[in-house]
Image: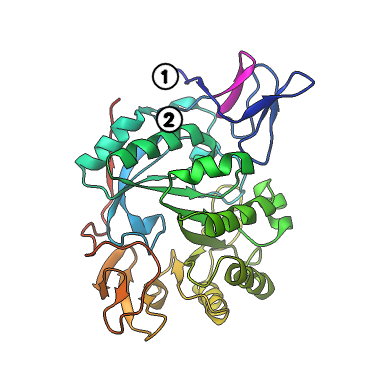
């Protein structure tokens, strides 16, 4: 299957004749034929093109809690897809076979924005998620899909590392209803050594989302033992979240499992996640979760007012729901998030599907 050549929206010519990509903080300056760090943006005919527009690594209907989003239409189904490549180089990437792909046939499924939206409608999905690899690098495709989804009353979700330039940020998130931002650590040294990137643009994205948009935001922090899980770093990170993003932003502390270039690092002990959760709660954060481990308390949503369990989860399955729309059934306190009048009915099943043009 030949790669696409969709004109990239964010670029400008430099004095030396190279074309600079303005989508993400890398600012790759490309000569004719060269590809950017993400691999999917290439300079052809003296302009940068997106080579994966309309092409996907596969489609699957998931529970929304798998993104993870715990406060965005709980127990509903989400049509998930990604492409190939990434604009970060995380040594611990769980989807490295996609993010580092240099074989364009990995993006084997072709689908127009309209066909994706109509498929979501046909399967009764509440939302469509751009995930698996980072949607920032296929921004033009994601934005077109998002607009088609909204035309059919389907919500949209971006699962992203938030590594995007200011010039493109407003456009990208304009048609997103929710996002889970992967805040990988709270030290610049970590981002440089383990991700080949920088921390500051991610923090700026988070502040922009919470302070200037209505996008529903949740955060994931993957805890790697002995690397980004120190008491000091967790204290500083959760303090920053509380002060800059507010107390209602859900955060998911997720367990690391050996992968890609960090197979020699042990999996995260459950106690490390429980400690991170305790720290976040001590900073006043109201919705703190643990992921990739069996932890009953870490999967529950509690009412900040009366401490009633308003949503009880076992992994991705809801086992208790005590909300009247967005209010605690026990005391009437408003629970932050996006909720339907009744809980969804999808459960924890996963359904791979194929989509035609």
Residue 354 vs 89, above or below: the answer is above
Boundaries of the magenta span? 40-49
Looking at the image, which residue is at 34% across and 36% down?
148
Task: Using the image, tell me which numbered label, if any, was put on residue 1.
Answer: 1
Residue 182 in view in this figure: no
> Which colour style is shown?
rainbow
Looking at the image, which residue is at 56% across and 82% down?
282
Residue 10 vs 276, above or below: the answer is above
Looking at the image, which residue is at 38% across and 78% down?
302
Q: Earlier in the sequence, mark 1 or mark 2?
A: 1
Q: Position of residue 351 (x, y in %)?
A: 26, 46
Q: CA distance from mark 1 to mark 2?
A: 9 Å
Work out which residue is located at the far top of the displayed protein and give it: 45
Is 318 covered by the magenta stretch?
A: no
The image quarter in which residue 46 lies: top right
User: Does the CB distance between marks 1 and 2 fall below 8 Å?
Assistant: yes
Work out which residue is located at the far front of the displayed protein and give it: 212
Task: Using the image, tell me which numbered label, if any, was put on residue 88.
Answer: none
For label 1, the SS is: loop
Residue 246 vs 357, above or below: the answer is below
The image quarter in which residue 280 lies: bottom right
For the N terminus, which image quadrant?
top left
Kindly identify which residue carries mark 2.
107
Q: Would residue 195 appear left or right of 320 to someone viewing this image?
A: right
Q: Position of residue 174 (x, y in %)?
A: 47, 44
The image quarter in which residue 206 lies: bottom right
Q: State whether the magenta stretch is mostly helix, strand or loop.
A: strand
Work out which residue is located at the far right of the displayed protein and give it: 16
Residue 157 in view in this figure: yes
Q: Position of residue 56 (x, y in %)?
A: 40, 33
For the C terminus, which image quadrant?
top left
* Crowding near the residue tagged with mark 2, few <14, some 14–19, many ≥20 C-alpha atoms within 10 Å: many
């Amino acid at each position: 299957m030949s790669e696409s050549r969709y004109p990239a929206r964010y670029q400008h010519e430099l004095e030396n004749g190279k074309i600079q990509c303005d989508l993400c903080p890398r600012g790759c300056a490309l000569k004719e034929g060269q590809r950017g760090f993400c691999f999917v943006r290439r300079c052809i005919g003296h302009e940068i093109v997106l080579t994966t527009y309309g092409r996907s690594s596969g489609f699957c209907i998931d529970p929304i809690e798998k993104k993870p989003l715990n406060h965005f239409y709980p127990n509903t189904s989400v049509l998930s897809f990604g492409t190939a490549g990434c604009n970060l180089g995380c040594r611990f990437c769980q989807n490295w076979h996609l993010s580092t792909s240099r074989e364009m046939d990995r993006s084997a499924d072709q689908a127009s924005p309209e066909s994706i939206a109509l498929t979501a409608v046909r399967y009764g999905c509440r939302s469509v998620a751009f995930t698996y690899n980072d949607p920032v690098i296929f921004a033009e495709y994601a934005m077109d899909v998002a607009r088609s989804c909204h035309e059919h009353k389907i919500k949209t979700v971006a699962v992203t590392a938030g590594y995007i330039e200011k010039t493109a940020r407003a456009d990208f998130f304009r048609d997103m209803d929710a996002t889970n931002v992967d805040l990988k650590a709270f030290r610049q040294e970590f981002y440089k050594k383990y991700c080949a990137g920088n921390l500051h643009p991610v923090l700026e994205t988070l502040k922009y989302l919470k302070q200037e948009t209505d996008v529903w935001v949740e955060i994931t922090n993957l805890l790697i033992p002995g690397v980004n899980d120190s008491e000091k770093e967790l204290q500083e990170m959760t303090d920053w979240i509380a002060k800059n993003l507010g107390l209602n932003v859900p955060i998911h502390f997720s367990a690391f499992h050996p992968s890609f270039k960090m197979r020699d690092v042990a999996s995260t002990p459950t106690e490390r996640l429980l400690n991170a959760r305790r720290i976040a709660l001590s900073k006043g954060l109201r919705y703190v979760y643990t992921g990739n481990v069996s932890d009953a308390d870490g999967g529950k949503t509690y009412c900040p007012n009366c401490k009633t369990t308003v949503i009880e989860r076992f992994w991705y399955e809801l086992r208790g729901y005590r909300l009247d729309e967005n209010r605690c059934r026990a005391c009437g306190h408003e629970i932050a998030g996006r909720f339907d009048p009744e809980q969804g009915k999808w459960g924890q099943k996963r359904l791979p599907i194929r989509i035609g043009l």
